[in-house]
């Protein structure tokens, strides 16, 4: 395989949930640069349209709430009709909830799980049959350091991000014989709106994070974008079922 082909996403159609902001936007930019058509999905039309205007050709926006599980098949059908068959699904949409475990209500807990896990499953089961039939496809998840170790005050988020690692293992074993790869990226602390909200007004937590990041500071969304290009590209054609930390060394341990 030529070098240019190994990392190329030319001919691919990547649907990215949460593609209008933060890490999802960075993945959309990087995958678009690698030659893919990108389909941005989120609840806010304005954010999505701004990205389409920035990227120009080969970028498309579809408004959709991933917790509207029953709408997943319809979304996939519309994208397939208007853009083409989805060859890469990025389950990236997420919400954060920071509060003590004992103050987290079952309803709040459920909402976090619905967004990260059940919503991702609803889309995956709508997209995967086409990938399996064509024997071509990759599915990515955006995990977290909370997929790998305990973090205080984010119990529902930790449950969701840990479950994601299980989803990736389960799907990857089931889909591997059909030519479909499934992987997860576990970002460390990355500068986005979500991390700003989680860390603003909490200097002690910020200091703890910086203190245990061997490479220092926070990562940039594009660090995750390029990792997504790699995992979705032919360069990673023998890689499935992994959770790849992109974290400046946070998960090394000490
Ligand atoms: P953002 O808040 O910028 O991104 C979250 C995205 O998810 C938004 O685009 C939002 O769009 C979308 N979203 C949320 N709920 C729904 C829904 N119900 N349906 C459709 N889209 C939805 O934060 P990040 O970019 O930081 O987060 C992206 C992912 O990265 C998340 O899964 C997060 O957990 C993960 N992550 C982030 C880290 C960080 O340090 N920033 C570290 C580790 C993981 P809209 O509101 O328009 O629907």
Image (cartoon, rainbow, N blue to C red):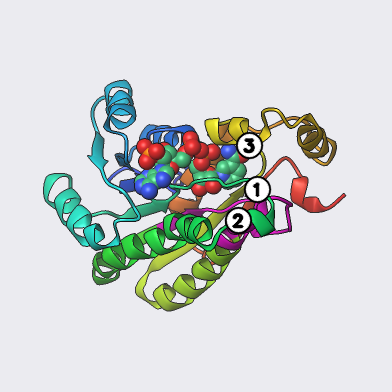
| Residue that appears at 56% across and 58% down | 105
Q: Is mark 3 within 8 Å of ligand 1?
A: yes
The Cα atoms of the two marked residues, 3 and 2, are separated by 16 Å
Number of residues whose C-alpha sits closer than 10 Å to that of mark 2, classed few (under 14), some (14–19) or many (20 or more): some
Towards the viewer: 111 or 193:
111
Q: Is residue 23 visible?
A: no
Count numbered badges in the picture: 3
From mark 3 to mark 1, how far is it between C-alphas? 10 Å
Q: Is residue 157 magenta?
A: yes
Q: Is residue 200 left or right of residue 131?
A: right
Q: Which mark is residue 104?
A: 2
| Residue 254 shown left or right of residue 54 in the figure | right
Q: Which mark is residue 99?
A: 1
> How far apart in space, not on screen, are marks 2 and 1 (Cα)?
7 Å
Where residue 139 sits: x, y (%)? Answer: 41, 58
Which numbered circle lies on residue 198?
3
């Amino acid at each position: 395989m030529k070098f240019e082909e190994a990392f190329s996403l030319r001919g691919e159609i990547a649907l990215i949930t949460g593609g209008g902001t933060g890490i999802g936007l960075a993945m959309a930019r990087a995958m678009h640069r690698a030659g893919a058509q990108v389909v941005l999905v989120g609840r806010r039309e304005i954010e999505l349209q701004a990205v389409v205007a920035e990227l120009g050709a080969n970028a498309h926006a579809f408004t959709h709430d991933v917790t509207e599980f029953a709408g997943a098949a319809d979304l996939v059908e519309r994208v397939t009709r208007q853009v083409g068959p989805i060859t890469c699904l990025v389950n990236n949409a997420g919400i954060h909830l920071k509060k003590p475990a004992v103050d987290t209500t079952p309803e709040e807990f459920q909402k976090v799980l619905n967004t990260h896990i059940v919503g991702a499953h609803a889309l995956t089961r709508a997209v995967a049959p086409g990938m399996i039939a064509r024997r071509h496809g990759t599915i990515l998840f955006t995990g977290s350091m909370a997929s790998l170790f305990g973090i205080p005050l984010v119990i529902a988020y930790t449950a969701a991000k840990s479950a994601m690692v299980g989803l990736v293992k389960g799907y990857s074993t089931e889909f591997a014989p059909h030519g479909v790869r499934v992987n997860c990226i576990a970002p460390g602390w990355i500068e986005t709106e979500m991390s700003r909200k989680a860390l603003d007004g909490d200097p002690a937590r910020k200091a703890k994070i910086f203190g245990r990041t061997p490479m220092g500071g926070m990562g940039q969304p594009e660090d995750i974008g390029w990792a997504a290009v790699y995992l979705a590209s032919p360069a990673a054609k023998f890689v499935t079922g992994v959770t790849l930390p992109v974290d400046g060394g946070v998960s090394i341990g000490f």
